[in-house]
Amino acid sequence: MNLRSTRLRLLCVALAVFTVAGSPGPAIAADGGYPELTPAQLVQLREAIAEQTRNPRGPYLRIRWFCEDGTVLPPDPYACRPHGGGAQHAQVRLEIAAFGELGFHFGTIYRALEPADVIDTEHAGYRARELVVQAYLERADDGWIMRRARFYRGARQAEDGRPRGWRFSAPLSPTETGSVNARCWRPGSSKRSRMPARAR
């Protein structure tokens, strides 16, 4: 399988999804300007993906506290309290994180991202489209790189990731005000869903 060709095709689909949804941004090459992969890099990428599907922790190394002041601490109770608070989630292995330079961001932790990282103007929105593709692969391919890491408790914290997701959505909203809250309705209900307070 030619992973580069597969990546381009999948990202073209994701780009179409965002275009239909009204996402701003010019028409661009689907690879976002990342460098061409060498044959050796393709081999390394295939091996890394296969290894992640077998690894009980997938792309992750361990669980850590990530404090507001930049301190990283073991997962002890309230460890970040003296450091201005923080969030607890998995830490991506360095050798896996290195693939990000090639346009493959495995094991994305939403709580660790800022909206600017997702909009990714440097690569014309590539990262946002990549997240769509990754979400599809996890659902269509039995978890994909998260096949066994789905059971790695604490790797992803919904209570931290959900509000951050709201923050990502606001800049991509096609409404005049950019308000996601104004466009979100509960299925089968006439009441609007409320944006989490931490995401406002």
Image (cartoon, rainbow, N blue to C red):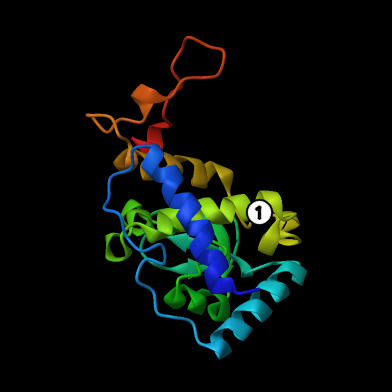
Residue designated by label 1? 138
Counting every numbered tag in the picture gives 1
Residue 173 versus residue 4 in the image, above or below: above
Q: Which quadrant does the N terminus fall into?
A: bottom right
Residue 81 visible? The answer is no
Residue 175 versus residue 124 in the image, above or below: above
Q: Which quadrant does the C terminus fall into?
A: top left
x and y percentages locating residue 58 in the rendered image: 68, 67
Is 136 left, or right, of 23 in this rendering? Answer: right
x and y percentages locating residue 99 in the rendered image: 51, 77
How many other residues sit within 10 Å of disc 1, few (<14), some (14-19) or many (≥20)?
Answer: some
The foreground one among 19 and 110 is 19
Residue 142 versus residue 167 in the image, above or below: below
Q: Quadrant of residue 168?
A: top left
Direction left: furthest residue: 176
Q: Please tell me which residue is depicted at 53% across the width and 57% down the height of the picture.
A: 10
The foreground one among 62 and 106 is 106
Question: SS of the residue at dot 1?
Answer: helix
The foreground one among 33 and 57 is 33
Q: Please tell me which residue is depicted at 35% across the width and 56% down the height of the picture.
A: 125
x and y percentages locating residue 43 in the rendered image: 63, 85
Q: Please tell me which residue is depicted at 32% across the width and 36% down the height of the picture.
A: 173
Direction top: furthest residue: 190
Residue 1 visible? The answer is yes
Direction bottom: furthest residue: 40
Amino acid type, label 1: Glu
Q: Please tell me which residue is depicted at 43% across the width and 60% down the height of the picture.
A: 67
Residue 4 versus residue 39 in the image, above or below: above
Is 135 left, or right, of 53 in this rendering? Answer: left
